[in-house]
Image (cartoon, rainbow, N blue to C red):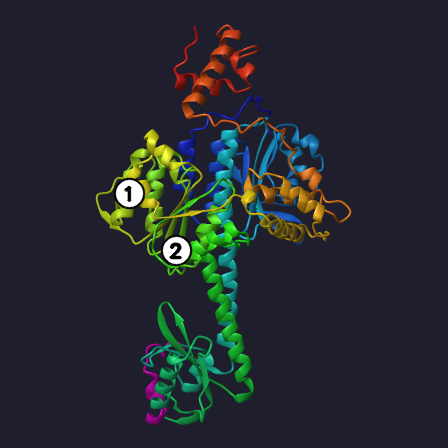
Amino acid sequence: MAATPERESFPAIDEDAALRSILEVTAPETGTRFFETLVRSVARALGTTGAWVTEYLPENRRLRALAFWLDGRFIEWEQAIDGTPCEVVIQEQRLVHIPERVSLLYPGDPGLQKNNISSYLGVPLKDAADAIIGHLAVVDTRPLPRDERALSLFRIFADRAAAELRRVRAERGLREREEKLARIFGGAMDGVIELDRDLRIEQVNPAAAKAFGWRPDGAVRLPFDRHLDPADAVKLRSLMAELDAKPTGESSTWIAGGLSSRRSDGTAFPAEATLSSYESGGRRRYTLILRSVQDRLESERKIASLTAETEVLRGEIRELRDLGEILGSSPPMVRMLDDLRQVAATNATVLILGETGTGKELVARALHDLSPRKSKPLIKVNCGAIPVALIESELFGHEKGAFTGATGRREGRFAMADGGTIFLDEVGEIPPDLQVKLLRVLQEGEFEAVGGDRTRSVDVRVVAATNRDLESMIREGTFRQDLYYRLNVFPLRVPPLRERGDDVEVLAQAFAGRFSARLGRTLAPLSSEDFAKLRRYEWPGNVRELQNVIERAVITAREGRLSLDRSLPEPQAASSGPARILTAAELEVLERRSIEGALDEADGKVSGPGGAAERLGVPASTLSSRMKALGIRRE
């Protein structure tokens, strides 16, 4: 591989174009084509020599490439993680960025040496239970200095890769169980016949086809009562009605006296049988199993068990997410949970209020799971994480040709949530010009896609969340008052951790158990001294910060005991009083004074040694952008 000149930063990144590439290029693809498209897009967006997405095989500590793009072509790749930078990503479950000399740091990795690799960037991919299932990485023959825009874009690519890998794994598990069910269904020595409410045949296994003299596919939609004596047909219909009236869990019965059946050639034969019923696709169906008494119980158990497993996996594909649980018994949490249970049973719009890290998304999930809409989708949208140029398309969809790069029609999140719930996190970040369209959906349940002229009606329950003061934003003119009142039908405040008393101990114990099990460690329970330290801390980052602190304590544990001293932040020096919160205008004045002062000291020089950017500790491009936004000109 030819030597490549060094560079001082990532190439200029068009973030909107890169994000559209993620949404537009990978959206139509699945499986292998998705991963191939993804890694090419990663390499192109970040300007790197190579990119790959892998699946982790924990039984032998290896990574197997789902798609590996290197030097303009795809290659096959599988390798043990030992002695490679990927090992750190997998073992420590974190993003790893090695800006240069990676081949010197990992001399045992032959691929780095062979391809003259200088830099590496990798991030783990996790499943719904937070276990490592793979990783996404890029490498380059040149140094890759740290660039927050590039890292943010890389994490978005990783989120898309993780979602697709979770879907592929769940689909693989479903397929394996369906194949297993089909083998048992097809290989059973007893006859199995699936019937609808009118006794028409929907499916038969080979044993039943052989017993009745049917061709393998010739029995579908035939009326089964033609193969029964009239009295037995009446008995079967009566048993079906009895099963319909029984409560859940009592959906099968032994047919006393069996059935007198007729083959297709008219010859009769007696059969012992059981009948069971189940719901599928909104319809009632019945399974008739004709078998010997000795085999009856075992065959029914296997079929029922595999059918249940299949339905569970179908549910996992519809909702690949970790529901988690809300822990806490402090008075503020008890009040909040009581309110949650009351409003969950209604269709009222809920506004979840709370500081960062309090668990607002978990509350939204609980609202959906306790509601009559729980069988329908819960669609989550982080309004603060979507670029302004894309948020309208993300919420309401777009038609082909609606804007540059819109190569096909795309459904929005409101359409996906039809019949279910949409969770609008960070709702205060929605631009004012889009708030009108959101208000219309809340009032009338109608919207038009970007570039479209057809009005779409949806039945969606809206749950919103914010940690911002929406009433202050109304006074500042950045949030519509009528939209606020539409969202604030039922406010639900999630208390900060500092108000939850003994909940800190309950949560800490739960997190310690989870992380200890994940790392395969056996640790002593938290002591009273540990609880005292946790209670003294103010927890500005709330539950999320507590989770991080406990995870660090588990990682740094020694001699079977957690190490809170190394994981808790240093106590802040006591101040004379609470710090005054500055307004946006005051912050802008401070920023302007700081930039102008640095320019004065640098004699108007922006970049280079001694320039204002160096004095402020920011990239020159960032400083130039802020100067333009604030209207500051060099003298």
Q: Nearer the viewer, residue 104 or 470?
A: 470
Does residue 401 show up? Answer: no
Quadrant of the image occupied by residue 572: top right
Q: Position of residue 632 (x, y in %)?
A: 41, 13
Q: CA distance from mark 1 to mark 2?
A: 21 Å
* Amino acid type of the residue that numbered disc 2 sits on in the rendered structure: Val
Q: Image point 52% across, 63% down: which residue?
A: 176
Circle 2 — which element? helix
According to the image, label 2 marks what residue?
Answer: 343
Q: Within 10 angstroms of label 2, few (less than 14), some, or many (20 or more) residues? A: some
Q: Which residues are magenta?
A: 216-232
Furthest-front residue in view? Answer: 576
* Amino acid type of the residue that numbered disc 1 sits on in the rendered structure: Leu
Q: Image point 53% across, 88% down: which residue?
A: 293
According to the image, label 1 marks what residue?
Answer: 439
- Relative horizontal placement of residue 458, taking residue 532 as reference (left or right): left
Using the image, determine if residue 609 lies above or below residue 540: above
Q: Nearer the viewer, residue 584 or 317?
A: 584
Does residue 315 show up? Answer: yes
Q: Position of residue 192 (x, y in %)?
A: 45, 80
- The quarter of the rendered structure image containing the N terminus is top right
Q: Position of residue 149 (x, y in %)?
A: 49, 30
Tell me if label 1 and label 2 are in contact, CB under 8 Å.
Answer: no
Q: Position of residue 404 (x, y in %)?
A: 32, 34
- The quarter of the rendered structure image containing the C terminus is top left
Q: Is residue 219 magenta?
A: yes
Circle 1 — which element? helix
The numbered disc on residue 252 is none
Q: Nearer the viewer, mark 1 or mark 2?
A: 2
Furthest-right residue in view? Answer: 559
Using the image, determine if residue 316 lies above or below residue 354: below
